[in-house]
Image (tube, rainbow, N blue to C red):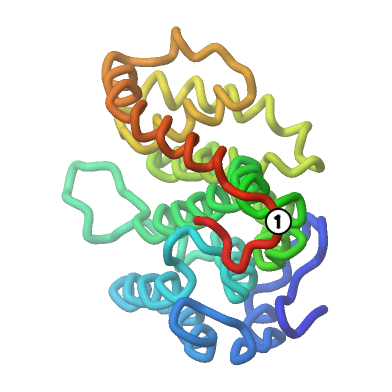
C-alpha cells in the first residue's frame, strides 16, 4: 500500500479508516493552503462522540481539499477515509437534537456524501472532456490527482451504494447524487440501471433544486428522455441557466490544445 495515497487501483475494497490515517504520508500531499499535516487529526475527529466536534472536524478537513473544483493530492486519501467511515456509528448516527415529532436526520452523513458527490462531479467524464479541449489529449495523464481519484471510483461507490436505500430521504438522495458520477467508471456499468430507478423515485418526491438538477443532468448525459420527469420548476431553472451553460460550452470549445499548466476548473 502506498504511503502517499493509500489506494488500490480499480479495487472495490476500502482500507480500514485507521489504516488510511496511519499509512498516508500526509505532510507530503498538497492541499488548498499547503500540505495535509493537519488532516489526520481533523479526520479522526469525525468519529468523536460529540456531534459538535464532528461538525467542526468535517469543516476543518474538507476545506483543506475543496477549492475551485480542483482535485488535490490530499483529496484521494481524504475521499478514501470519508468513504471508509460512512458506515461508522458516529457518522451514521441521527441528530439527537432534531425537533420532537419530526423524523431524525443525519447531517454529518449527508455532508460527507455531498462532498464525495461534488468531488466526483469535478472529476467526471465531462470535466475530462473540457480539460482535453483546453489542454490536449494528455490532460488526464498530466493531472495525476484527478486520475488517481477516478481510479478509486469503484471503491468509493461500494461505500455509497448501500445508502441508496437509507430511511432518511436526505441521505439516500445525497448518495444518489454521489453515485451517478462515480458510476461512470467502466467497472460499474452493471450498476447504472439501478441508479435510473432511484433517480425516478427522487424526481417523483424531492423538491431540492440542486439534487434534481444533478440527477436530471446525469440522466440526460446517459441518453434518457427526461421530459416526463421534469417539473415546471425544473424547466424554469433550465431555461434560466441556458445562456450561462451555452457560454461556458462556447469558451470550452475555443480552448487551445496542448500542455496546460493548471486544470481549467
From the image, tell me which residue sits under label 1: 258
Q: Quadrant of residue 15?
A: bottom right
| Residue lying at 59% horizontally and 24% vertically, measured from the top left | 196
> Vertically, is 168 above or below 95?
above
Q: Residue furthest top?
A: 228
Classify 10 Å Cα crowding around label 1: few (below 14), some (14-19), many (20 and above): some
Q: Position of residue 38 (x, y in %)?
A: 48, 89
Residue 224 appears in the picture as rendered: yes
In depth, the one of 60 and 145 nearer the eye is 145
Residue 121 placed where, x, y %?
54, 47
Q: Is residue 88 above or below residue 99?
A: below
Q: Nearer the viewer, residue 36 or 96?
A: 36
How far across and down, in percent of the image, does residue 260 sit? 64, 62
- Answer left or right for 226 relative to 259: left
> Which residue is found at the position 55% from the left and 22% from the top?
220
Q: Residue at x 65, y 61 (%)?
A: 146
Q: Is residue 116 above or below residue 179?
A: below
Image quarter hosting the N terminus: bottom right
Residue shown at the point (40%, 19%) measured from the top left: 204
Q: Which picture quadrant has residue 130?
A: top right
Res. 47 in view? no
Asked where in the image residue 164 lies, by quadrant, the reply is: top right
Residue toward you, 103 or 55: 55
User: Quick check: 258 left or right of 89?
Assistant: right
Query: Total number of numbered labels?
Result: 1
Image check: 204 left or right of 85? left
Q: Position of residue 40 (x, y in %)?
A: 54, 85
Label 1: which secondary element: loop
Amino acid at each position: 500500500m502506498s504511503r502517499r495515497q493509500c489506494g488500490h487501483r480499480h479495487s472495490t475494497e476500502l482500507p480500514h479508516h485507521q489504516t488510511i490515517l496511519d499509512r498516508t504520508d500526509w505532510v507530503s500531499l498538497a492541499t488548498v493552503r499547503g500540505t495535509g499535516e493537519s488532516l489526520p487529526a481533523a479526520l479522526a475527529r469525525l468519529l468523536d462522540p460529540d456531534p459538535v466536534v464532528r461538525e467542526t472536524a468535517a469543516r476543518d478537513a474538507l476545506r483543506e481539499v475543496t477549492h475551485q473544483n480542483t482535485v488535490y493530492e490530499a483529496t484521494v486519501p481524504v475521499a478514501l477515509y470519508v468513504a471508509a467511515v460512512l458506515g461508522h456509528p458516529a457518522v451514521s448516527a441521527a441528530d439527537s437534537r432534531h425537533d420532537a415529532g419530526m423524523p431524525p436526520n443525519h447531517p454529518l452523513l449527508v455532508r460527507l456524501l455531498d462532498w464525495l458527490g461534488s468531488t466526483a462531479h469535478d472529476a467526471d467524464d465531462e470535466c475530462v472532456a473540457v480539460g482535453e479541449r483546453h489542454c490536449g489529449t494528455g490532460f488526464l495523464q498530466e493531472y495525476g490527482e484527478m486520475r488517481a481519484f477516478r481510479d478509486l471510483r469503484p471503491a468509493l461507490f461500494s461505500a455509497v451504494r448501500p445508502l441508496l436505500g437509507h430511511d432518511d430521504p436526505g441521505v439516500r438522495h445525497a448518495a444518489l447524487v454521489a453515485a451517478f458520477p462515480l458510476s461512470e467508471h467502466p467497472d460499474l456499468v452493471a450498476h447504472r440501471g439501478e441508479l435510473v430507478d432511484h433517480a425516478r423515485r427522487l424526481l417523483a418526491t424531492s423538491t431540492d433544486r440542486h439534487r434534481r438538477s444533478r440527477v436530471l443532468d446525469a440522466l440526460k448525459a446517459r441518453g434518457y428522455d427526461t421530459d416526463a420527469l421534469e417539473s415546471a420548476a425544473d424547466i424554469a431553472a433550465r431555461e434560466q441557466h441556458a445562456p450561462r451553460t451555452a457560454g461556458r460550452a462556447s469558451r470550452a470549445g475555443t480552448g487551445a490544445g496542448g500542455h496546460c499548466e493548471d486544470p481549467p476548473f
